Amino acid sequence: MDKLLSIVVPFYEEKEKDIFPLLSSINSQIGINFDLLEVILVNDGNQNTIADSFLELFFNLDIKVLYMQKNKGPGVARQYGLDRVKGQYVMFCDADDILHNVGVLGTFIQEIYQNKPDIITSPWLEELQDEDGNILYVSHNLDATWMHGKVFNTSYLRNYDIRFDDTLRVHEDSYFLGIAFDLTDNKRMLQNLVSYVWRWRKNSITRVNGAEYTFKCIPIFNEAVSKSYHVLERRGRESSLYYKVTQMIMYTYFTLHQKEWQIQDTYLKEAEKSFCERFKPFISYYLNIDQALAENIYKEESIKYNGIPTETLEQWLFRIGLLEEGD
């Protein structure tokens, strides 16, 4: 590896004008040696091409463009780039987002030199638009469920065979991060660095049609998370699943009892059905968790939502079939 940091950027429908802000935000970083940086753009099977004259605008950057023959989704595109990076560390960015400020990469690189962690994570911003067209920002702090604002040790990913699941076209990050964050204790949280902005796009798959994606794709989210649990079991990480399974059950219980879900009858039924099917193999972890820990998890999840559902957690688990008589 002859680079310190590789930035992998999959793109599909995005054209040069859409990718320009991200590349500009990388090109404008200060206090770093750009010779140690590479940017890999991965075309996910679209006919869009990137002209050399466009790439030359970003004079600081060593940019490579890779072309996949077929569209297979962002997870496969990220893996295609990951398999070809030369950097000791790798960061994944979406093509239409931006780095938050000119000091992001310098801060990440300083952390790499000082501590050599397997994973670096940091707060990031989600850009939203209200009904009046005003831009708003929501802060996401130190999460392990989105790919934004994170850097990974490439050798760690390869040595532990941590890869994107090529069958998941969405929620591929939930699967990947669910494994990556569990297999190492060598993680660094940069609480004072806001590193990334997930930019608002009205035609984004996650935001069109009243955010229908959120409701429609929950069964795939359940599949992605349960697949990560199976991997952790195979790798001898059962001890971590007591917390993970219990937290997932309580998160889903509170989420599906929110008003926006209760009016989505068809999607709600599908979500509950898939959750029961996917997490039935892991119910023993929930049944055998330390009760004090379970109570703490319940409290942690409940404060994220407005009010306690009238249907109790136990009633819900029996209704959807995750618990049965005798459990």
Image: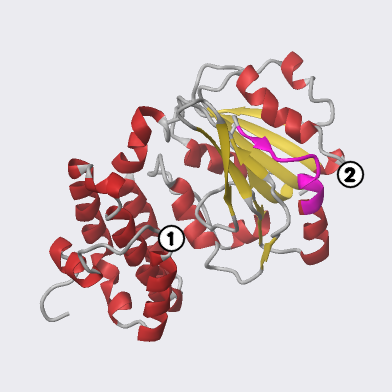
Label annotation for residue 7: none
Q: Position of residue 103 (x, y in %)?
A: 80, 45
- 71 displayed left or right of 28: left
Q: Is residue 273 above or below residue 43?
A: below
**Pointer 2 residue:** 31
Q: Pick the quarter of the image with the C terminus.
A: bottom left
Q: Assign a secondary structure to mark 2.
A: loop
What kind of residue is marked 1? Lys
Q: Which residues are magenta?
A: 97-107
Identify the residue shown where x is 18% and y is 44%.
Answer: 265
Q: Position of residue 159 (x, y in %)?
A: 60, 62
Q: Is residue 83 above or below residue 162?
A: above
Q: Position of residue 195 (x, y in %)?
A: 69, 46
Q: How many marks are shown on the rendered structure?
A: 2
Can see residue 37? yes
**Pointer 1 residue:** 304
